[in-house]
Image: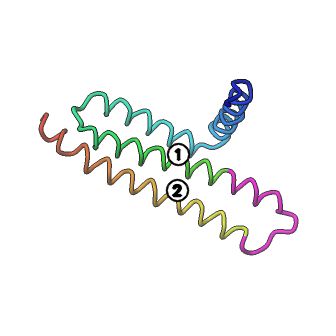
């Protein structure tokens, strides 16, 4: 059975993680701002259910990757005194994953919104 207190505590921990990254990482704030713009655009344009779902999925995926990137960076930073040459590569690879996701999300946004923008103008 679901314990509401434990569930609420879990949500609080999750929110704390999101809030910490939002406070400390400019790139995450940028991704959040992009997601907010997308939410407005989804509301303004007459998108199909599939288009809406695709936009939500790619935006959420990019935010999740940004959260993972922040977690991995902090984990790697724990070992800085004994840093291995791979540590910087790991951080770069995670940043690369976020970049690939962001570019993919941008392309999806263009493919989804372009026909609707062209139709309005």
Percent coordinates x, y for residue 21 in the rendering: 65, 41
Q: Is residue 58 above or below residue 16?
A: below
Q: Earlier in the sequence, mark 2 or mark 1?
A: 1
- Seen at 62% across and 52% down, the residue is 68
Disc 2 and disc 1 in contact, CB within 8 angstroms: no
- Seen at 63% across and 43% down, the residue is 25
* For residue 65, side relative to residue 55 (left or right): right
Mark 1 neighbour density, 10 Å: few (under 14) some (14–19) many (20 or more) = many
Q: Which residue bears the numbered disc 2?
A: 98
Q: Which residue bears the numbered disc 1?
A: 63
- Seen at 14% across and 41% down, the residue is 118
Q: Nearer the viewer, residue 106 or 51?
A: 51
Percent coordinates x, y for residue 84 in the rendering: 79, 73
Q: Quadrant of the N terminus?
A: top right
Q: Nearer the viewer, residue 12 or 114?
A: 12
Q: Main secondary structure of the magenta part?
A: helix
Q: Residue furthest bottom?
A: 85
Mark 2 neighbour density, 10 Å: few (under 14) some (14–19) many (20 or more) = many
Percent coordinates x, y for residue 108 in the rendering: 32, 51
Q: Quadrant of the C terminus?
A: top left
Label 2 element class: helix
Say whether residue 101 is magenta: no
Q: Residue furthest top?
A: 5
Quadrant of residue 38 in the image? top left
For the record, the magenta segment spans 71-86
Say whether residue 83 is magenta: yes
């Amino acid at each position: 059975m679901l314990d509401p207190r434990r569930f609420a505590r879990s949500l609080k921990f999750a929110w704390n993680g999101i809030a910490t990254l939002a406070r400390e990482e400019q790139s995450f704030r940028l991704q959040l701002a992009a997601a907010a713009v997308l939410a407005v655009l989804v509301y303004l344009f007459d998108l199909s259910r599939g288009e809406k779902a695709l936009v939500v999925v790619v935006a959420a995926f990019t935010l999740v990757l940004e959260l993972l990137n922040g977690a991995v960076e902090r984990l790697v930073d724990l070992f800085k005194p004994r840093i291995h040459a791979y540590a910087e590569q790991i951080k770069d690879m995670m940043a690369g994953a976020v970049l690939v996701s962001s570019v993919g999300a941008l392309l999806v946004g263009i493919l989804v919104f372009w026909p609707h923008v062209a139709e309005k103008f």
